[in-house]
Image: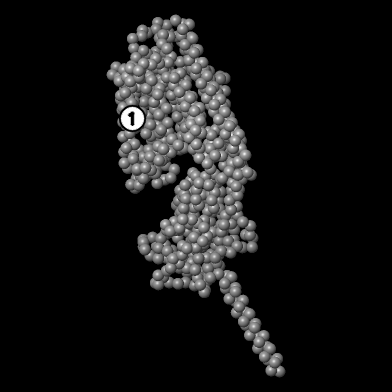
């Protein structure tokens, strides 16, 4: 009898332990909301604003260092830090396309101070965003705020340019879902063999920040790092095939170009000289 | 610029700060101020064409219509491109020269070269036509009456002597225009420093754009972009352009307007980068040479128009496939550029062949011809 009770106690304890283990596992899988929230504070309008003053590239290892500690008086909020990428695609044709992203926040509380979703899109080498176009979109209220950082040279081909980052601020609506359409343009790609160059898009970095108060310069705002999960339908990677020059064309393109230039120049030269001769013949005849 | 900052903060601004200054009312008065100015310049060009042709005693309605009613040229101004201002300045320079107003022509020439680098190609024909036998500042130069036969006693090209090379008029022109050019650059440099030098001047001189454009060189430049071109390669690619310019100047400089027109067409056709706005540079000079062309609209004229527009449209179709459909047609697009160069060459040669050569200035001391020939 004692052993039976003992066994059931052990069983109950094991089940309890198992359940609490499961609980903690699911908590860490879900994110870092309760135990070690990755929050930081910024004093600029944009998270990426001062990034390039200390960092020089957008590699993963360097990117993680943008988090700064908060001062004591910033209120801490316990908010679920998970977002799901419901849809991500590159839409359109040709050199000018849109990166469409739909994000859903888990259990969004409209009472929270953290109202602004910040999407930091580290653009791959090979595409760029036009700051002027984004500014006009902001004026038409497609985004709350938007800015481009990094290499914003619109004309360089991709092997001469460095990467750029687009930071978009959007307000979250009631159901915690938001959709962003970012216009992008293709750069000229490095030449290759196949005639096309594949540019792959990674996941955006998402943050939830409190609203920026425009007139207060040095106020710190808290931002929460969101971990991004993919929905079941969004499993394939997003890429863009951009036309690129073909290496095997190089020699005969150069030769034919110069032959064409020489032939044209020669025809014009001959026509000019002949025309002069004809005129002077005519003139001498008339004398 | 209205808020006191440099216009070069905008990464694709590659013009003189004077243009930005001219457009400051865009921020203050109305955002279409610039377009009004450019459209007004467009009309001014039409007026100048009429005045220049009147000076040469030619009835000019059709010619003026060729400029004013050309859908390509008037849309350039209305979409906000500054080329009509440049065209107006060039025509004013020609008009001033015809009136004998050397200093005014020199002043505007210095200004226009500061504004846009390309008019530097006109330096040689202008200097050549300032031959002291033809042009003396002070008295109005006598313009060749093209109805008569006085041209029969003159040689087509200039007879050089070292003394005449440095005539008073030529030196004055050089000094005034050079002075204006340097002064404008100095003021711009003072305000905007090296940014101005790089963006407004050096960029245009060294521009090699691998992005697709009408030029035959674009694919060659793109395929070689990863490595720099050597000095020898750059020189070789510049040779066709250089030879053609020299050939045209030394063949036709006595008729500087015709010479300038041919030079502009050739310059654009052989340039490393060709964009549609460059065509306006020779469109404004075309009405000035049309009255002397033996080319009839039917059918030679129409053939030239169809070939030139056709080659352009063909290029644009491939360009559309590349840019808006994302299909790799770079090779076909490059071949379309070659076809466009062929069309340009054909039209240029035809215009040369059909032109009735007419010097601008009459030599001092020659007598008027008695015969009056009708225009055929």
User: Regarding mark 1 in the picture, which secondary structure is present there?
Assistant: helix
In the drawing, does residue B375 fall left or right of residue B172? right
Q: Position of residue B307 (x, y in %)?
A: 57, 26
Relative to the observer, which residue lies in front, B245 or B68? B245
Q: Quadrant of the N terminus of chain A?
A: bottom right
Direction bottom: furthest residue? A1
Res. B292 in view: yes
Which residue lies at the image location 55% right of the left edge and 23% below the top edge? B346
Which residue lies at the image location 47% right of the left edge and 72% below the top edge? A77
Which residue lies at the image location 61% right of the left edge and 41% below the top edge? A246
Which residue lies at the image location 52% right of the left edge and 71% below the top edge? A33
Q: Which residue is mark 1?
A: B178
Q: Give the quarter of the image for residue A23.
A: bottom right
Relative to the observer, which residue lies in front, B41 or B293? B293
Chain letter of disc 1 in the image: B
* A191 up-or-down from B362: above or below: below
Q: Quadrant of the C terminus of chain A?
A: top left
In the drawing, does residue B189 fall left or right of residue B272? left
* B14 up-or-down from B153: above or below: below
**Colour scheme employed for the rendering of this structure:** one colour
Relative to the observer, which residue lies in front, A207 or B303? A207
Q: Position of residue A17 (x, y in %)?
A: 62, 82
Res. B142 in view: no
Relative to the observer, which residue lies in front, A162 or B71? A162
Total tally of numbered discs in the picture:
1
């Amino acid at each position: 009898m004692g052993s039976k009770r003992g066994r059931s106690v052990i069983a109950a304890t094991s089940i309890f332990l198992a359940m609490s283990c499961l609980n903690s596992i699911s908590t860490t899988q879900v994110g870092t909301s309760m135990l070690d929230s990755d929050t930081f504070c910024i004093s600029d309008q944009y998270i990426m604003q001062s990034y390039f003053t200390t960092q020089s590239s957008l590699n993963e290892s360097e990117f993680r260092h943008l988090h700064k500690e908060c001062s004591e008086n910033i209120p801490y909020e316990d908010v679920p830090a998970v977002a799901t990428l419901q849809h991500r695609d590159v839409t359109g044709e040709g050199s000018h396309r849109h990166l469409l992203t739909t994000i859903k926040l888990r259990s969004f509380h409209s009472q929270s101070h953290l109202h602004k979703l910040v999407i930091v899109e580290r653009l791959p080498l090979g595409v760029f965003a036009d700051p002027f176009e984004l500014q006009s979109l902001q004026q038409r209220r497609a985004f709350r705020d938007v800015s481009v950082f990094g290499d914003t040279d619109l004309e360089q081909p991709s092997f001469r340019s460095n990467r750029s980052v687009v930071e978009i601020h959007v307000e979250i609506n009631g159901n915690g879902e938001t959709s962003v359409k970012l216009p992008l343009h293709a750069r000229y790609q490095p030449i290759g063999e196949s005639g096309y160059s594949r540019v792959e898009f990674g996941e955006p970095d998402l943050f939830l920040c409190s609203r920026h108060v425009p007139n207060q310069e040095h106020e710190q705002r808290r931002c929460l790092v969101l971990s991004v999960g993919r929905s079941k339908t969004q499993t394939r990677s997003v890429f863009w095939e951009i036309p690129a020059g073909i290496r095997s064309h190089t020699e005969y393109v150069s030769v034919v170009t110069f032959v064409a230039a020489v032939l044209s120049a020669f025809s014009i030269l001959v026509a000019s000289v002949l025309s002069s001769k004809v005129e002077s013949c005519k003139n001498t005849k008339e004398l | 610029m209205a808020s006191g900052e440099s216009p070069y903060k905008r990464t694709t601004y590659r013009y003189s700060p004077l243009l930005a200054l001219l457009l400051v009312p865009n921020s203050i008065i109305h955002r279409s101020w610039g377009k009004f100015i450019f459209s007004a310049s467009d009309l001014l060009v039409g007026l100048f064409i009429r005045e220049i042709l009147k000076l040469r005693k030619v009835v000019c309605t059709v010619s003026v219509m060729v400029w004013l009613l050309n859908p390509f040229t008037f849309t350039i101004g209305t979409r906000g491109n500054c080329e009509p201002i440049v065209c107006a300045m060039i025509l004013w320079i020609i008009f001033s020269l015809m009136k004998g107003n050397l200093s005014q022509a020199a002043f505007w020439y210095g200004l226009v070269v500061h504004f846009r680098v390309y008019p530097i190609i006109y330096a040689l024909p202008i200097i050549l036509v300032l031959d002291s036998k033809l042009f003396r500042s002070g008295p109005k130069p006598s313009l060749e009456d093209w109805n008569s036969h006085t041209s029969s006693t003159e040689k087509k090209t200039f007879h050089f002597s070292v003394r005449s090379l440095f005539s008073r008029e030529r030196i004055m022109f050089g000094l005034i225009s050079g002075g204006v050019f340097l002064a404008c650059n100095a003021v711009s440099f003072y305000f905007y420093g090296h940014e101005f030098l790089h963006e407004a001047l050096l960029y245009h001189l060294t521009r090699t754009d691998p992005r697709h454009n009408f030029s035959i060189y674009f694919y060659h430049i793109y395929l070689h972009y990863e490595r720099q071109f050597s000095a020898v390669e750059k020189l070789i690619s510049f040779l066709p352009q250089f030879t053609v310019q020299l050939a045209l100047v030394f063949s036709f400089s006595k008729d500087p307007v015709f010479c300038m027109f041919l030079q502009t067409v050739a310059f654009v056709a052989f340039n490393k980068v060709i964009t549609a706005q460059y065509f306006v540079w020779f469109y404004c000079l075309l009405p000035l040479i049309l009255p002397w062309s033996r080319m009839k609209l039917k059918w030679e004229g129409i053939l030239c128009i169809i070939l030139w527009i056709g080659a352009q449209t063909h290029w644009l179709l491939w360009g559309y496939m590349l840019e808006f459909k994302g299909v790799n047609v770079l090779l076909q697009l490059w071949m379309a550029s070659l076809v466009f160069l062929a069309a340009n060459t054909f039209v240029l040669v035809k215009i040369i062949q059909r032109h009735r050569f007419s010097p601008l200035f009459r030599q001092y001391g020659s007598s008027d011809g008695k015969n009056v020939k009708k225009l055929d």
